[in-house]
Amino acid sequence: MTTMQLVRRMLFLLIGGCVAGCSGLAYAQSGHAKAHDAKAAGAAATMPAEYQKAMDYLGKKGDYQDHVLKLNVPRTDLAMTVGGIKLPTPFGFGGWVAMTPGAGGHQVLMGDLVLLPEEVNPVLSALLDHGLEVTALHNHFFYEHPRLAYMHVHGHGTAMELAERVKPALDLIGHVVPLPAAGEGRALPSTPALDTAALTRIVGHAGEQFGPVYKIIIGRSDLHVREMGALINARMGLNTWAAFAGSNDEAAIAGDIAMLSSEVQPVLKALRSHGLEVVSIHNHMIGTAPAIYFLHYWGTGPAEKLAAGFKAAVAELGRKR
């Protein structure tokens, strides 16, 4: 055999071995991919028994994928328009609740509930009363009719514990007595005049008179919040306040409360236990240390009762937990 024949022979064997090896590798990879796809499909189709039990208990439709049970809470009871345009429920009016496994055998629950204004505070109270947390309350649209609020929820526990805790809130959705249609409005009475001295005594902070409104502003001097080295104080928006209008017997209150993350749930509970309504929970600042959350609230009733509710919320600020 000549040298040239020998070289050709070696190349033939080398190429043949490579083709066979690559074909075998491709076949193995193909088999692995098929097995992986079958495994993924099985995971998506096989719902854990505890999730099935929770879903049946709640009476909601949902699915199980990527280790998450997601239940639908759509507002199909509402005929929604945005800017005068009729829009279907999946456009942005479908609430949900989801669970996924956490540490220690517990589940993590999160969700986003789509609520009418009159449903917000009954649902919020039901969540708090049953050991769940409310982490945000805001709008997703302008110009929608009817008006909507979006409430984000959070909790830990077993699947059935979480189902039992969230069910009272879910059962209220679509079943709260609607608010009467808004008319032209009426003026609050001005007599007997607000007893501002009594309001100051109850809250523990003096306020200022702005025409018919008595406003109490409380800074968070216990916090040292900075941005780009600048100290963010009450004048820069790091404050809690309450505005009172009307008479001593029939007044309105509105305001804003600046909170650390650990203070949000206690403040929510304090306000709701005193009959004050929570309007929104959100951020006013980004990138501050520590992070600050803001809560807006509203209520009507005797002025001193409203002041007591505000004071109860303020008392939750700055506590060591």
Image (cartoon, grey):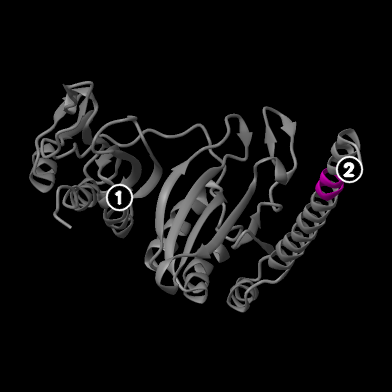
x, y (%) of residue 125?
Answer: 40, 60
Query: What's the magenta region?
Result: 12-18
x, y (%) of residue 114?
Answer: 57, 49
The amino acid on which the numbered mark 1 sits, given as a three-letter code, is: Val
x, y (%) of residue 138?
Answer: 47, 40
Callouts 1 and 2 close, C-beta under 8 Å: no
Looking at the image, is mark 1 or mark 2 nearer the viewer?
2
Q: Residue shown at 59%/63% (left/top)?
A: 67
Alpha-carbon neighbours of circle 2 within 10 Å: few (<14), some, or many (≥20)?
Answer: few
Image quadrant where one finds the C terminus: bottom left
How far apart marks 1 and 2 lie (CA) works out to 79 Å
- First of labels 1, 2 by sequence position: 2
How many marks the image carries: the answer is 2
Which of 135 and 206 lies nearest the eye of the viewer?
135
Label 1: state its secondary structure: helix
Q: In which quarter of the image is residue 200?
A: top left
Alpha-carbon neighbours of circle 1 within 10 Å: few (<14), some, or many (≥20)?
Answer: many
Which of 70 and 133 lies nearest the eye of the viewer?
70
Q: Residue shown at 54%/63% (left/top)?
A: 99
Q: Is residue 17 shown in magenta?
A: yes
Q: Is residue 79 visible?
A: no
The amino acid on which the numbered mark 2 sits, given as a three-letter code, is: Arg
Label 2: state its secondary structure: helix
Q: In which quarter of the image is residue 131?
A: bottom left
* Pointer 2 residue: 9
* Pointer 1 residue: 264
